[in-house]
Image (tube, grey):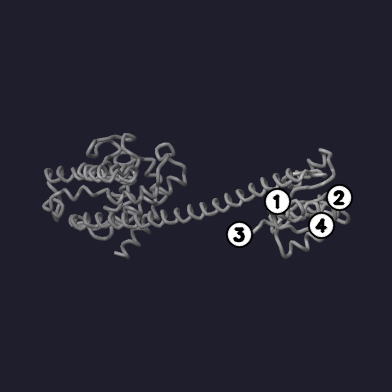
Amino acid sequence: MEAKKKLITIVDDSLVTLRACANVLEEKYAVATVPSAEKLFDLLEHNKPDLILLDIEMPNMNGYEAIKVLKENPETSDIPVIFLTGKSNPDYELEGLSLGAIDYITKPFQPLLLLKRIEIHLLLEEQRVTLAKQAEELKDFNENLQRMVDEKTQKVMVLQDALLKTVAELVECRDGITGSHIERTQNGVSILLQEIVKSGSYSEESSGWDNDQLIRSCLLHDVGKMSIGDHILKKPGALDSDEYEEMKKHTVFGAEIIEKIESIAKESDFLKYAKIFALSHHEKWDGSGYPGKLKENEISLLGRIMAIVDVYDALVSVRPYKKAYTHEEAVKIIVENSGTQFDPDLIEIFCRTAEQFKSNSSSCAVKA
């Protein structure tokens, strides 16, 4: 099947020029000739040429005025225009190119040169259209690929969250704790993190944190309890000194469990945060905590945050060996331990968010 010829439209008020150009071009191209710019726009309503040869000096509307109209109309702005004119002054050529023409040929023209320049510009235009189409296809591909990646990532995140919550609930079941301790502590960490960001506190220590990952990873802060025997974990009364020493090891066991997962999964930030929560949430500001007896800023900020959240929830919850304290009583106890058990600056932040902790505790209790 013979390829469709490209359409060249010649605009000139000289019938001699129109006939001469047509004679040169008709063997290779489809040709339409019009004697004025007005006729050109009539023609464009029905046919869009691949290239326009445009004279400058014409009555009523000259070539400069015509190209301005062409370039202002989105339907015709991409049609390549070559000025074909008797004006040989460089200033005229510069003005024509400035208005959007792709070339400027003076009369009388050399037929082979005219053909070659048209051929080159049509090839360039064809390549431009091809590149634009490929760019659009690539954009669509990238958008579809990104959408697929986002959907896959979301599925992985949902699965990861489900696994985390399942593990956390297993820990709660083994510990004999009910009432959504894991959910409440996760919400408590979120409350303190939001206030830290809002107040601009601890900007150096928290620089580069992914708070979403932090909040998700704190679910594993007690995962080490899975390695503690039931005779200790489920004991209804207070632990003796030996049992308490064994219980304290859940922080180290938790870090070891997470390290094992980390070595298999090659995970970085998420499990890094989880390990910090697990290992350091029982350290105390005055150095009397465990397992490392770390003191003040030696303790990770994440551990200092979880220490407050964990103790608050333990205070307001019923345990086999204690009654639940009221919110006000729990806040009083925590404030009294500022500077000994807890970071004093974090206690100030806790006090500003105390009502949110109360609401969090109440809403989770309702759901439980």
Mark 2 burial class by Cα count in 10 Å: few <14, some 14-19, many 20+: some
**Disc 3 to disc 4, C-alpha distance:** 32 Å
State which tag comes first along the sequence, 3 or 1. 3
Determine whether the residue tagged by mark 3 lies in a helix, strand or loop. Answer: loop
Q: Which residue is mark 4?
A: 37
The Cα atoms of the two marked residues, 3 and 1, are separated by: 24 Å
Could you tell me if the residues under marks 3 and 2 are in contact, i.e. CB atoms within 8 Å? no
Task: Give the residue pinned by disc 1.
Answer: 80
Q: Quadrant of residue 280?
A: top left
Mark 2 sits on what residue? 57
Horizontal relation, residue 267 to residue 39: left or right: left
Q: Earlier in the sequence, mark 4 or mark 1?
A: 4
Above/below status of 12 relative to 96? below
Position above or below: 348 against 5: above
Q: Amino acid at mark 1?
A: Pro
Which residue lies under the disc numbered 3?
Answer: 2
Q: Residue furthest right?
A: 59
Q: Is residue 1 above or below residue 249?
A: below
Q: Which one is earlier in the sequence, the residue at label 3 or at label 2?
A: 3
- All told, the count of numbered labels is 4
Q: Nearer the viewer, mark 3 or mark 2?
A: 3
The secondary structure type at the circle numbered 2 is loop
> What's the residue type where badge 4 is placed?
Ala
